[in-house]
Amino acid sequence: MNRFRSLVDGLGNSLRLPADWRERLKFHAPDALAWRLLLLTFVFTVVVEILIIVPSAASFHERWLLDRLQSAELASVGVEALPYSAVEDEAAEQLLAIGGVQAVVVGDQGVRRLLLQAPNLPRTPDLIDLRKSRPVTRIADPWRTLFGHPERSIRVQARPRYRSGDFIEILAPAEPLKVELRTFLLNSLLMSLLISLVAGGLLYGGLAFLVLQPLRRVTRSIEHFALDPEAEGDPPSDRHDEIGRVERELARMQEEVRVSLRSRARL
């Protein structure tokens, strides 16, 4: 900070800028209140970004899985409507492809029934039970999918909505979800970043107008009074808040000092 301030002061002196320009340039050094306020606004913007993105990713992840579960459940209802639940391999593959899953399992009264199964299933898929998911798990699941192995598969269990049974289970590849999740996060990040920047800019502008500008007037008044106590300063504003009271008290004290100096000059 001190090195940057020296560099700014040296640049102003070498270019022989007017005194008021050098004063403004010095005032806007990185350790000034305006820069700290700007940094604080940036930090708050990042925090807002995180608070928006994290639950949005969890909601998108769960909604994607529920959509696959719904498609698989409707396909299982169609399979059970066939005589003896007989489905040829080609038809099963088409049903699985439509639902975007690799296998469909229905659990009823402790019995698991495999209705649709595709070949070459992965051996160790990760289990996500939407019936008893905790908030921490819901928040962590999207990031496990996003940074997981490309060949990772997910076992998803949930309560059935269109049929009887204890649960409906699907086995789905994680790569399509990862691609859609990455696109969703990118779009959400850009949109929320734009909103946060606009809100942060408005907040910074409002604080600069309501706080920084009056404080700069007070600072200039003190500096000018230190250089020439006899000179009349700017009159205080008509504000009724704390800054207005500071301006009026400062003007009163400066006037008392001037009266005291004039009294000493007469003696």
Image (cartoon, rainbow, N blue to C red):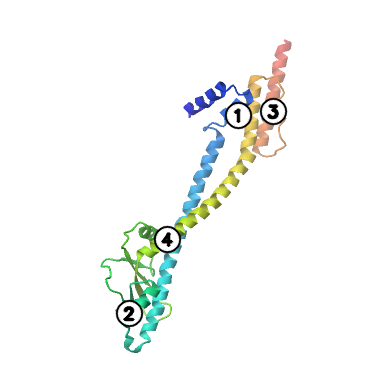
Rendered-image quadrant of the C terminus = top right
State how far apart marks 1 and 4 are (Cα): 48 Å
Q: Which residue is mark 3?
A: 251
Q: Which residue is mark 2?
A: 90
Tell whether 133 sits left or right of 191.
left
Tag 4, which secondary structure? helix
Q: Residue at x 66, y 23 (%)?
A: 225
Q: Amino acid at mark 1?
A: Arg
Residue 117 picture location, percent across and down: 30, 76
User: Which one is in front in this view, the residue at disc 2 or the one at disc 3?
Assistant: 2
State how far apart marks 1 and 2 are (Cα): 77 Å
Residue closest to the far left: 123
The correct choice, above or below, for 109 with respect to 202 in the image is below
Q: Which residue is mark 4?
A: 181
Q: Which residue is mark 1?
A: 24
The picture quadrant where one finds residue 151 is bottom left
State how far apart marks 4 and 2 are (Cα): 30 Å
Instruction: Answer with mark 1 or mark 4, whichever residue precedes in sequence.
Output: 1
Tag 1, which secondary structure? helix
Taking depth in this image into account, of 237 and 258 the one nearest to the observer is 237
Q: Residue at x 57, y 49 (%)?
A: 198
Circle number at residue 151: none
Tags 3 and 4 in contact by the CB under 8 Å rule? no
Tell whether 42 sits left or right of 66.
right
